[in-house]
Amino acid sequence: DADVTQTPRNRITKTGKRIMLECSQTKGHDRMYWYRQDPGLGLRLIYYSFDVKDINKGEISDGYSVSRQAQAKFSLSLESAIPNQTALYFCATSDSRTGYEQYFGPGTRLTVT
Amino acid sequence: GENVEQHPSTLSVQEGDSAVIKCTYSDSASNYFPWYKQELGKRPQLIIDIRSNVGEKKDQRIAVTLNKTAKHFSLHITETQPEDSAVYFCAASQTNEKLTFGTGTRLTIIP
């Protein structure tokens, strides 16, 4: 079944550590996104990629970086984690050919202590 | 850039009653307005969407209305059921561009 997967699903890390969150999809979609979800703040866009060679900053990109290793893989890195990056992170995909719907992964719960 | 405001942040309704969630957007160029539902511990999923050439769209108990002049759109759920309890997000975008989400509404259906 074509899907969007995220690893790890849960992660606890310490302040100052580098951490990578990974997203893979088997939907064959060209577009991929990273969102952050905090209570009361909704889904905020961190970075998005409309194809392998196109990467764009979202509204809250400071402190984050991304890599689009292939059409199916999009990774989010926190170079030096800080406690206010504690949140639920979602990856999503969409297909520019068929419409606008975004398909979300299961999420990664990240805690920075 | 686009700014989407969503109200209320929490909503409780008796089972069988209707629920209405409202959103406003700032960019008059936006022409796509989806609604996502996120059940507890789950991922957001699209439940209905509307494009700016349509004023209303229905899908069984769910409907969305759009007022382009006032730049607001609403989600209507009729005959609410316990499984409607979730967080609902509205969003807006221009054609084939990135989405801007509202801050979410936590809907609780009271049995």
Image (tube, coloured by chain):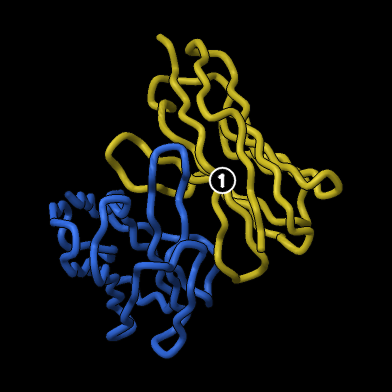
Chain colours: A blue, B yellow
Tell me if mark 1 has few (under 14), some (14-19) or many (20+) residues whose alpha carbon lies within 10 angstroms of its own.
Answer: many
Q: Can residue B21 be seen in this view?
A: yes
**Which x, y percent locates residue B5?**
63, 42
Q: Residue at coordinates 34% horizontally, 69% vertically from top-left?
A: A64
Q: How many numbered badges does the structure rendering display?
A: 1
Q: Which picture quadrant has residue A82?
A: bottom left
Q: Compared to B54, does A56 lie above or below?
A: below
Q: Compared to A2, does A83 lie above or below?
A: above
Q: Residue at coordinates 38% horizontally, 64% vertically from top-left?
A: A34
**Which x, y percent locates residue B109?**
44, 17
Q: Which picture quadrant has residue A11?
A: bottom left
Report whether B64 appears left or right of A109: right
The amino acid pointed to by label 1 is: Gly
- Return the residue found at the far front: A16
Report whether B108 appears left or right of A28: right
Which residue is nearer to you in this view: A13 or B40? A13
Q: Say which chain tag 1 marks.
A: B
Residue assigned mark 1: B102
Which residue is nearer to you in this view: B86 or A48? A48
